[in-house]
Structure formats: C-alpha cells, structure tokens
Amino acid sequence: MTDFPQLPVTLDDVQAAAKLLDGVIATTPIEQSRALGRITGSEVYLKCENLQRAGSFKVRGAYVRMAKLSDEEKSKGVVAASAGNHAQGVAVAAARLGIKARIFMPLGVALPKLAATQGHGAEVVLHGHNVDEALAEAQRYADETGAVFVHPFDNVDIVAGQGTIGLELLDQIPTLDTVLMGVGGGGLLAGVAVAIKARARELGREVKIIGVQAENAAAYPPSLAADALVPLSKVSTMADGIAVGRPGQLPFSIIRELVDDVVTVSEDALARALIFLLERAKLVVEPAGAVGVAAIMEGKIKNPGNTAVILSGGNVDPMLMLKVIQRGLAAAGRYLVVRILLDDRPGSLATISRIIAESDANVTGVDHTRVGGSISMGDVAITINMETKGHEHGEKVLQNLRAEGFHPVVLHG
C-alpha cells in the first residue's frame, strides 16, 4: 500500500486475508435505516456483523491468524482468553481448521457465552475474576506448553482479518462517506481504517472513519491526545465487548495515523440504541455493537454524508438485555418507577391505581412492604412500575399524584 508505507498492516494484507476467508465467513447484509437518516440528514446503513458466524466480526481475524500457522504450530494448539466474542471466534476458526483450542474465560462469565464457546468445540477453562486475569493465565499456558496465543486485537493478522469488513462495505455502498464502529482494543477500527482509506484513495475519494467508545471505558481519546498509550484505572460499562482499559500498541499505531475521530457515548444512549435496533430495525445487537447507533442518536456525528454503522456483534446475555431494556425505556421516558410512603389504611393503593389509570399510564408491577429502615410504624412503602409515553407524560403522572397529596420519589425514569 504505497499511500501508507509506514503502517504495520497494508491494503495488500487485508486483501490477502479476504482470500483466506472466502467461503469461510458470511458477507453480512446491509440494512438501510430511514429513522437514523432523518437524524443525520443523509442515508444511514447498518452493516450486520451481528449476523456473522459465531455472532460477531471476531471470527474474521481469528481465522486469518490461525490459518497462517505452520503445521508444527497447529499441532501444538491455540490458546486465547475472552469473556465472549473473541472466545467464540477462536472456537469456530479452530474447529474449521482442525486445531485444538483452549479458551480461558473469567469466573462469572455469562452462561450463554460459555455454552456457545463449548458448543463450537473449544475446551473452556474458567480462571480469574476479569479478562485481564484470564489473559495472563492464557499467556502463562502458552509459554508453558508452546500453544500459540491468539491475541484479541494486538496482532497484524487479526487486524488484517477484521479489515475485510471495510472491503465489503465499499463494495456494498460505493458512495460511502463515513463509517462508524465501536472500539475497544482497536483491532476492528484499525483494520477497517486501513482497508477503506487505501481503497478509497485508489478511487480518488475520501471516507471518514470514526471510532466510538463508551464514556466510562474510553482509553483512546486520552491516548490520542497524548500520542502514547494511556491506560485507564477503571472501566465500567454495559458494553463488555469494548470494555478495554488499554489500547493495543499495534492498532494504536494505525488509528493515530488514519482515523478521523473517536467520540464517546453515555450508558443511557447505549440503552436507547439497543431498544431502537430491536424496535425499528428488528435486530438483536449487543451494547458494544450498538455504540455507532448511539453516537448518531446522541448527536455526536455532524454532517456525515452517506454513513455505514458496523453492528459488530449480537452476543448478548438475556439477563443483561433485560436490564438494558429497562434502562433504555427509563431513559426514553417510557418506564417509570416510583416509591411512595403512605399511611397503612384501606383504600390508599386503590386511590393511587385510579390516579395512574386516569393519567393513561399502565402499571406493570407493584411492591408493597411494611418493613424497612425508612418506614415508620403504621406506614407502608409502595413501589410502582409503570409504562409511560415519554418524559412529559411521566411528569404529568407525577403531578397528578402530588395533586392528590401523595409524594412519589422517582427511582427510575
């Protein structure tokens, strides 16, 4: 790639990776989103890597990395560490190539992700309380046994494999102006940036590449500002697929040269984006895969032109999805939870129910208790979950309760 000769991954590398992946992975579909297009004032397309084999883009890089191993290396097996998508990608690639795979996953990993990884034929070992501890154990195992350690993002073959998404995007949307995607360690963002920037330049065009991080797990903005890796002391986000506290050295060296911007989004924006994708696009997407949509909905992307958002994965734990849906509905003003202290006498709950019904809200759950540190003798605490129609409607319900002498305390909404 003559335009960026100093980079460790080139367009030629990505094209070679695409040949290795031919017949192995799916060319994932593109779906247009008119609702997101109305926000940006242009066309917006969703690249559905959540429909990829093993449920995410990770199988691309894992397969390329492992397909290039020597026969001797393959005979020793591979080892990896992950809490989800990378584990499943390595397991699928290993099964396809006939390589024994051992995956270290942290204790407490979501059962669906554990079962899926085992279902693809990998040996799973639970170790440590987080991915960092599992990674350390995987590296120790590799050093001890000679098994090949398959890093989730800090490897040239991994980056090249992920970059094949960029080649597909330009084939599917020749008029592309901007591409958005989540970034954790940086393998996906780096690979797609290499592929699209180089290919677009060959065509005499420019395409903007924008990474998106959860604001509570955003190591790239400070690292790019300092032009050096700046690890985070704490990472806390529902987007576990991009909950990486330290950028990969190799991806960072590419991203600082090619990527136009990295923006951040809030947890509430992430929750709203997941609900939007469920309701409007009929797509199940994990939080890490929805960050690009969240950035558009939160107004972080200005004048992007024809835009593609990479939905990087769809492996979401149902229990997490339940919590995210509740949070998203609350953030959108469609789910309101209030707690009311009142005298424990007959008729009080019936009065509250009447007020809520007359306010055109729908009660979905009620908790009634007489015991608690803040509850006096003769009092009762009632917690009510209800569906509302937006922030204004929720406020109207609260006003009607207060007008009848009640004092609702909002817990969610």
Image (tube, rainbow, N blue to C red):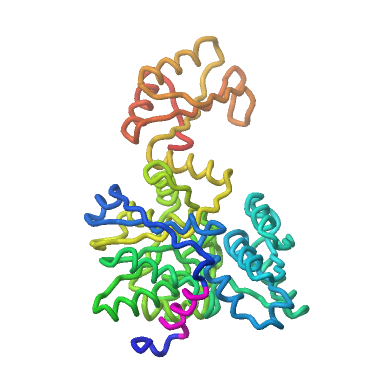
Task: Give coordinates of residue 89: x percent, y percent.
Answer: 59, 64
Horizontal placement of 131 versus 218: left or right?
right
Specify whether residue 11 is painted magenta. Answer: yes
State the quadrant of the C terminus. top left
Task: Give coordinates of residue 47: x percent, y percent.
Answer: 40, 59
Q: Is residue 279 above or below residue 70?
A: above
Secondary structure of the magenta portion, mostly?
A: helix
Q: How many marks?
A: 0
State the quadrant of the N terminus. bottom left
Q: Residue at x 50, y 10 (%)?
A: 347
Q: Residue at x 60, y 76 (%)?
A: 67
Horizontal placement of 85 versus 46: left or right?
right
Q: Is residue 112 above or below residue 132?
A: above
Q: Is residue 290 visible?
A: yes
**Location of residue 100 (image quadrant):** bottom right
Of residues 84 and 357, which is closer to you in this image?
84
Of residues 287 and 18, which is closer to you in this image?
18
**Location of residue 310 (image quadrant):** bottom left
Q: Residue at x 52, y 26 (%)?
A: 365
Task: Give coordinates of residue 369: x percent, y percent.
Answer: 61, 23
Of residues 33 and 174, which is closer to you in this image?
174
Residue at the front extreme, as displayed: 23
Residue segment shown in magenta: 8-20
Q: Is residue 195 above or below residue 125?
A: below
Residue at the top extreme, as displayed: 346
Of residues 366 and 47, which is closer to you in this image?
47
Q: Is residue 127 visible?
A: no
Task: Give coordinates of residue 225: x percent, y percent.
Answer: 39, 76
Specify whether residue 5 is painted magenta. Answer: no
